[in-house]
Image: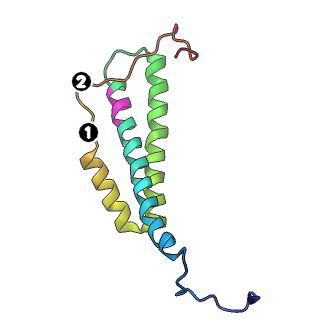
Amino acid sequence: MGEIMTLTQSIEIAFEGPASRYVRERPRTSLSDAVEQLAGLRFSIVLSARQESSGVLTAPARAELRDELRRLRSRYSDKIDEIAMNYGVQAAIDAKEGVEREVVVPKTMMPPVKTKYDSPYEI
């Protein structure tokens, strides 16, 4: 039958069981998910910065967008730190460089400008 393990016994790390393959592959999937989230943040930052600098917004709207940009940049930095802590510094450097190289926002693309008449309930 089964064996009862106490906290003072060592756990055999090299044990290969049916779930071992899944456990070994999971970090790669999680790293790719983290890089995808990093790319989404980078895209949002570029698009929001473009809108902020466009000169179309009113002063209060521009101030609100600057606050949002500050939060996005903070989340971007936090995500890079999270990748470094979970997967290593080199993985974080590679992810950051890859995202900055690969994420492209077309020059003609601008986010929609909300007006005071826009309803959050529209579909």
Magenta-colored span: 46-50
Tell me where residue 72 appears, x and y as whole percent: 46, 40
Q: Is residue 71 magenta?
A: no
Q: Residue at x 43, y 43 (%)?
A: 73
Q: At x 25% / y 47%, what residue is drawn? A: 102
- Quarter of the image where one finds residue 46: top left
The vertical placement of 77 against 4, above or below, is: above
Q: Residue at x 59, y 89 (%)?
A: 12
Q: Quadrant of residue 113?
A: top left
Amino acid, disc 2:
Thr
Q: Secondary structure at mark 1?
A: loop
- The disc labelled 1 sits on which kind of residue? Val
- Determine which of the numbered discs, if any, sits on residue 104 in the image: 1
**Label 2, label 1: how far apart the Cα atoms are:** 12 Å
The answer to whether residue 13 is left or right of residue 100 is right
Q: Is residue 39 above or below residue 51?
A: below
Q: Main secondary structure of the magenta part?
A: helix
**Numbered mark located on residue 108 in the image:** 2
Q: Position of residue 83 (x, y in %)?
A: 44, 60
**Closest to the observer: 115 or 58?**
115
Q: Quadrant of residue 56?
A: top left
Name the residue: 48% across, 59% down.
Answer: 82
